Image: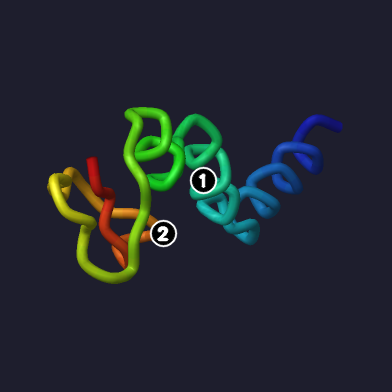
Amino acid sequence: MRAPYFLLLTLCLFCCQMSSGVGYLTGLGHRSDHYICARSGGTCHFSSCPLFTKIEGTCYGGKAKCCL
């Protein structure tokens, strides 16, 4: 009686994509670069940084600059 359950379990494990939810689970603890920039006191700019500030990182997935 245990053999059919074991075969069904192995079939499900082979047919299911185990890595489909991995990206979602690892992304839960990560903060966006915009949040990190704002938390450190910076602002995000798509153009050049204002006077007397310097580039400290990126925002919006590398599309903008974090200026402090």
Rendered position, 10 above or below 63: above
Q: Which residue extends farthest right?
A: 1
Query: Label 1 neighbourhood size at 10 Å, few (<14), some (14-19), many (20+)?
Result: few
Between 8 and 4, the residue placed more toward the observer is 8
First reached walking from the N terminus: tag 2 or tag 1: 1
User: What is the distance, in whole Å, between disc 2 and disc 1 at their CAs?
Assistant: 22 Å
Residue positioned 36% across, 46% down in the render? 43
Left-right relation of 9 to 40: right
Which amino acid, by three-letter code, is at mark 2?
Tyr
Rendered position, 16 above or below 24: below
Residue positioned 64% across, 57% down in the render? 16
Between 61 and 57, the residue placed more toward the observer is 57
Quadrant where the image shows the C terminus: top left
Marking on residue 22: 1
Q: Position of residue 29 (x, y in %)?
A: 49, 30
Marking on residue 12: none
Which element carries disc 2, helix, strand or loop?
loop
Which amino acid, by three-letter code, is at mark 1?
Val
Res 61 → quadrant: bottom left
Give the mark toward the camera: 2 or 1. Answer: 2
Q: Which residue extends farthest front?
A: 51
Between 45 and 31, the residue placed more toward the observer is 45
Q: Position of residue 35 (x, y in %)?
A: 45, 39
Which element carries disc 1, helix, strand or loop?
helix
Query: Label 2 neighbourhood size at 10 Å, few (<14), some (14-19), many (20+)?
Result: some
Left-right relation of 43 to 26: left
Q: Say which residue label 2 marks.
A: 60
Q: Position of residue 66 (x, y in %)?
A: 28, 50
Residue positioned 35% across, 39% down in the render? 37
